[in-house]
Each structure stands twice: as structure tokens, then as C-alpha cells.
Image (cartoon, rainbow, N blue to C red):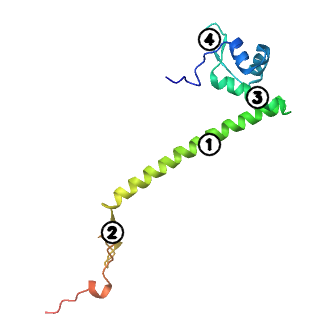
Amino acid sequence: MALDANAPLFVISVAAELAEMHPQTLRQYDRLGLVSPSRAPGRSRRYSQRDVDMLREVQRLSQEGVSLEGIKRILELENQVDALRSRVRELGEEVVALRAQQAAQRGDSRVFAAGLAGDVVSLARGQRPRPRSQALMIWKP
């Protein structure tokens, strides 16, 4: 059975140990909004595996010299990119479904044209209106 990466499992001391940080650093990151863990009923923080991974990423960026404000902006942009990718995927699936729906409807669809008298004439798909010379028959008794 696989664990849910978003399940709030770890208390702050365990999350700090997993991320190789001091618990006070985790509190500071929470205050700054870099990593926002869930809250248990007693208001204690509960970190998920995804939170721990995020803490490691914050630590990596910090060690590379990126400021905490810069890190916050990077994380926001990454979240925005993930959301946009998800939306693009949804829209792509919607386009595929709409194209399939249109293809299914084409077999039953009809084309309309203007008749000689200005009336609307129904034609089957692929059928052309008859040329005027053939359409007009003059009756002579």
C-alpha cells in the first residue's frame, strides 16, 4: 500500500529530522508562508511527505544563495506552472472529447442551401445543389 504524499503524518520534530533542519527553522518557514503544514486539533503542526520535500527544496535554494523572499516567489511560480499544466491537460482532454462528439454528429448532420425561390433547401453532406439550368423546368403544354 502506497502512502499519500499529502497525508499530514509528521510532527514538527520528526519533519525537522527528515528535512535535516532545526524545528525553529520549520516554524520560521511556516510564518513566512514558504511551507504551510496542516494543523492538528490542538493547533500543532502536521507535516506531509510533500511538505518535507518542499523543506528540502527550500534548504537547497537557500544554500545556493537565494533569499527567502526569492524562494517564496520561486515556489509560487512553480505552483502556478503546475496549475497551468494541469489546466492545459484538462483543456486538451476537453478538445479531444468535443472533436469526437463533432465527428459522431457529422454522420447525421445536414447542410442547408438557398433554393431558387429563396427558400431553405436541405441537402445531405457532400451533396451539391443542382445547377440552375437543371433546377428550372419550364412546363409547356
The structure residue drawn at horizontal position 43% and vertical position 55%, both measured from the top left corner, is 99
Of tags 2 and 1, the one toward the viewer is 1
* Crowd class of label 2 (few under 14; some 14 to 19; many from 20; radius 10 Å): few
* Crowd class of label 1 (few under 14; some 14 to 19; many from 20; radius 10 Å): few
Q: Earlier in the sequence, mark 2 or mark 1?
A: 1
Res. 51 mark:
none
Pick out the residue farthest to the right.
65
Q: Residue 75: percent from the left, percent from the top?
A: 72, 33
Res. 125 mark:
2
Q: In the figure, 87 relative to 114: above or below? A: above
Of tags 3 and 2, the one toward the viewer is 3
Q: Which residue is mark 4?
A: 40
Q: Is residue 34 visible?
A: no
Q: Do residues under tags 1 and 4 come within 8 Å of each other at their CB atoms?
A: no
Q: Residue 2: percent from the left, percent from the top?
A: 52, 24
Type of the residue with mark 1: Leu
Q: Earlier in the sequence, mark 3 or mark 4?
A: 4
Of tags 3 and 4, the one toward the viewer is 3
Label 4's element? loop
Q: Earlier in the sequence, mark 3 or mark 1?
A: 3
Of tags 3 and 1, the one toward the viewer is 3
Label 3's element? helix
Q: Earlier in the sequence, mark 4 or mark 2?
A: 4
Q: Earlier in the sequence, mark 1 or mark 4?
A: 4
Type of the residue with mark 4: Ala
Q: Which residue is mark 1?
A: 84
